[in-house]
Image (cartoon, helix red, strand yellow):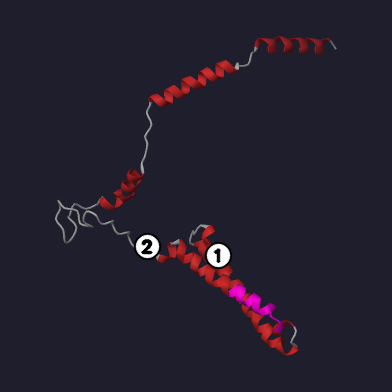
Amino acid sequence: MKRLVWALAVLCVTASLVSAQSLAEVAKKEKERRKKVDAHGKTAFTEKDLREGSRLPETRSSTSTPPPGGTAGTPEGPSAGETPAEPEQDPTKTQPYWRERVAAVNKKIQDLEAKLQSPELTTDPRGASRRQAAERDLAQARNEKQAIADEARRKGVPPGWVR
């Protein structure tokens, strides 16, 4: 019991000696830290800087030969007033390409689902073979949609493009 009392006494004494930082001290240190960060200077990028930066790899050349059809001192490209042409992209790497593919399959699925809900296939006993064919086509369309999603995932396409 004496050991427990001594341990508690030692704990209370050491706890009173150790003090936490006050809120004022923390605020003062944060203010000093922010002044130090601001003293280093900040760089602000504009749209123009970003656009020019994205063209830097295209304008740099690993060889020192001038481009064909032009001289070394004059840049080849659009004249003043024209916008520079976008470099041609692989169409499979664009959002509209994937959206159109998925939209076509979604339309096909909707049409087949509507066909399966039609009265001629739901109530007519003679429409059983047509109903089975429509169900088979619907399953095939759903598999096609899944195949597109799998292909997009393998190619690193953002998932939002194929939803």
* Figure quadrant of the C terminus: bottom right
The residue drawn where x is 75% and y is 84% is 123
Above or below for 47 versus 14: below
Residue 50: x and y, percent? 35, 45
Residue at point 73%, 13% (across, down): 11
How many neighbours does mark 2 have within 10 angstroms: few (below 14), some (14-19), or many (20 or more)? few
Picture quarter containing residue 18? top right
Q: Main secondary structure of the magenta part?
A: helix
Q: Secondary structure at mark 2?
A: loop
Residue bounds of the magenta highlight: 108-119
Which amino acid type is shown beneath numbered disc 2? Gln
Judging by the rendered image, the residue that carries numbered circle 1 is 149
Question: To which residue does mark 2 refer?
Answer: 89
- Spatial separation of the CA atoms under disc 2 and disc 1: 21 Å
Name which residue type carries label 1.
Ala
Q: Is residue 70 left or right of residue 51?
A: left
